[in-house]
Every structure is written in C-alpha cells, then in structure tokens.
Image (cartoon, helix red, strand yellow):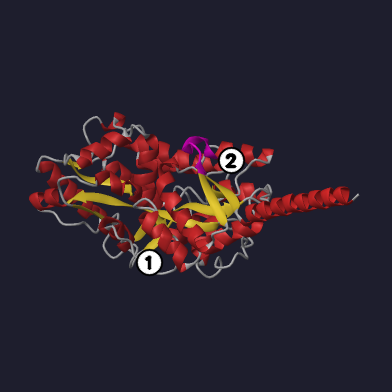
Amino acid sequence: MKKLLLFLLTMALLTAGLIAGGNTDSAAASEKVTLTMGSWRTDDVEQMDRVLAEFTKTHPGIEILFQPTNPPDYNATLRLQLESGTGPDLMYARSYATGLQLFEDGYFADVTDVPGVQTAYDAGTRSPWATAEGKSFAVPFVAVSHGIYYNKAIFAEAGVTVPETWDELLGAAKKIQAAGYIPFANGLGDEWDIAEVVFMSIAPNFIGGYEGRLAYEQGKKKFNGPEVVALFEAMDSLQPYLPSGYKALGYNDSNALFATGQAAMYFDGSWTIGTFDGVDFDWDVFAPPVPKKGDKGYVCFHADAGMTMNAATTHPEEARAFLAWLSTAEGARALADNLPTGFFPMSSNSISIPDAHANSFLAMNKGRGTDVRWAWPELLAGTPSGYDLMMNGSIAVLTDEMTPKQAADAFVEGLALWYPPAQ
C-alpha cells in the first residue's frame, strides 16, 4: 500500500512539473508578439529591417517582419489578403482615394487617437490619409520631393547660373545646347516619367500650389483656364531642348544621360539620389522655376506612403505601439538614419539628414509652398483619370499632336465626364 501511495505521489509530482513546465514555456512564448508588415517597397528590405530593429530595442516583446510585395501588384494583393482575412498586421497605405477606400471598406483601422498622430503632424501632412471629417486612417510615413538635377561643371562651362524663372530656364537650356550638351535628359519612353516628374513637378508653380489646387477642386477655376494653358505651354517649350530620339527614350536611359555627363539637367525626384552616387562630377538640385519674376514658388513634396494597421489584427495594442513610436522623435530619427536616401520622414520632430543632396531637396521647401502631385487628391478616381489626361496632354504637346490650348481643353473635357467641379 505504501509503495502504491509513493508511486501515485511521484506521478502526481511529475505531472505537476510537466504542467508547470508547459505553462512556463507558454508564458515565455506569449511575451513575444510577432507582427507582419506589408509594403510595395521591395527595394527597402535591408533598410526597413534596421528601422524595425530600432523599434524592438525599446519594445523587446514585439518583433515585426517586413514582407513587401512586388510594387505593381501591391494594391490588388493587399485587398485580396484583407478580404480573405490573411492581411498583414501593419501595412503601407496609399494616400488619398486608394487608401480611403480600404478604410471605408473596414480594412484599415481608425488611428486618429494613436498617441502622436495629432501632435507630430500638422493638418496638411495628415490630410492625404484623412477623411473629410478629419479621421486618420494612417500615420504619415514618408514623402518624396521633386526638383531639377543639374551638372555644376556644365553650368560653369556654359556660363549659366541656377534659373529662377521659366524664361531663365529656357535661356540656360539654349546656352547649354550651344555648348554641345543636352539641356534636359527626360524622354517619353516611360510615360509616367513625363507626367509625374515634369508636368506634376512644375504644376504647383503655375496653378498656385495647395490653395490653387483647391480652387480647381472646388469648381472655382476652370481646368482649361489660362494657368492650365500656360502650364501646357511650358511643357511644349521644353521640346527643342530634349535629347535626340526623346519620344522613345526610357527612364533608365535618361538616368544614364545625366550620370554620364551628356545632359546638364534632369527633372526627377529625390528617390533617384542614390543613382548618382559615385559619378565623376559635382551636381546638385534646384526647385522648378516660377513662371515669372515675383511669383511665389512651390515645390512638389509628395506624400508617398502612410503606415496603418489592420482593423482585424489580433494584436491591436502592439500594432498601435509601433504607430505611436513612428510619431516620436526616436521614430523619426530611425527613419531619417535608415530609409533609402531621398525618402523623408513626415514628422514635425526636428531631424537632420546626413546626405548633402537629400538636404538640398529639403532646403527647397524653405520659403516656398509645398503640395502633392496634382492628380492624387481628387483626380484619380474616375475614367479617364486626371493622371492619364495630364500624361496624354503632355505627350501630345511634346509630339505636336496638340497645341497647349487643345491639351487644356481635352483635360477639362475628359474630367467633365465624371468629375462635377469640371462640369
């Protein structure tokens, strides 16, 4: 009997030990939460891993796995994931209509009350990821800037200085051409390039920046009015100074023309800074010139990506913790130090960027107004989209298929098919 009692007691102790051990393992496992992050930036794996490692230093119980999608597939893939219940916990959010639709469909969480969202970003910065009522469906994450790259040696050789007005820009181009160089590297082979980094880069100066854009969106100005005609005229005026064969010249070809010193200037964005690391000449960037002397200058400082959380995540507190961290000075610093050069944190926390050329892009904002690409806030939702109309009109004037006035008229006629302020 004693042997039986001893046996039962031993088994009870062993069982209790196993259970206790199992509970300990489970508790340890529960201390570590793993979140996934979706993105369209497949080029940024190494950089984002460093950013996320900085977050984990102060939040050791949370690990975030960066899992980007092929950029052209991101929108469709993300929606499919969210609809099937397999979406990431955190994800990059497109600005304006595309992101707003996912919020209205219940997939993006309301992040209005996440600590820092209302204080680390001003209303204009929050607006690309906000509803008409002011609810935020994403935290402002990174922006990119637009400008004109220029070869300092060619400028010196041709005897030109950085232009401040459109006429001065064309005068500089004429002198550069006479010196034996291509004035502008841009072409039409990749159609998005002429739309985004030329037309939408110079548009704020012609339409009056943020306030001017609102006037068009509110129906107070006509989309084929004199400012828009002047904008298409400016596009047309570049034609004599583009490379030979520019109609078929692709984006990478344009990069090469500037990088090899054949072209003196290049309309492009801050995301290309790294492409010109190591070139054997000194270069810098300047803001697109204003139409005439005395006009207020504007820079296209585009809201590229927000960061949001899945409304259905099983770890909402941990996801919110990351969004709140992004809004702190530490989060802004981690982005500034680790993101690819030319992608800028949107937080109002004071930061400095180590790269001189990135600082040149940021310096263009000083004393100038800023706005996003004209098509993004209101003109992407219908058919034909404002984006396509801007792109097609730009190409048409640069190939002599339309006059600037005809391009402006086609712009308003296309928008009027679906966009009430244009009707």
User: In the image, which disc is placed on residue 103?
Assistant: none
Indicate the secondary structure of the residue bearing disc 1: loop
Q: Amino acid at mark 1?
A: Ile
| Of residues 2 and 23, the one drawn nearer to the viewer in this rendering | 2
Q: Residue 108 in the image: x percent, y percent? A: 63, 51
Would residue 73 be counted in the magenta stretch?
yes
Label 2 crowd bin: few (<14), some (14–19), many (20+), radius 10 Å: many
Quickly name the residue at label 1. 351
Q: Quadrant of residue 204?
A: bottom left
- Label 2 belongs to which residue? 78
Q: Residue at x 27, y 56 (%)?
A: 357
Q: Which stretch is magenta?
A: 67-74
> Can the viewer see residue 1 in this picture?
yes
Whole-percent x, y for residue 352 in the image: 34, 65
Residue 139 versus residue 403 in the image, above or below = below
Q: Tell me what residue is drawn at x 66 percent, y 48 percent.
A: 107
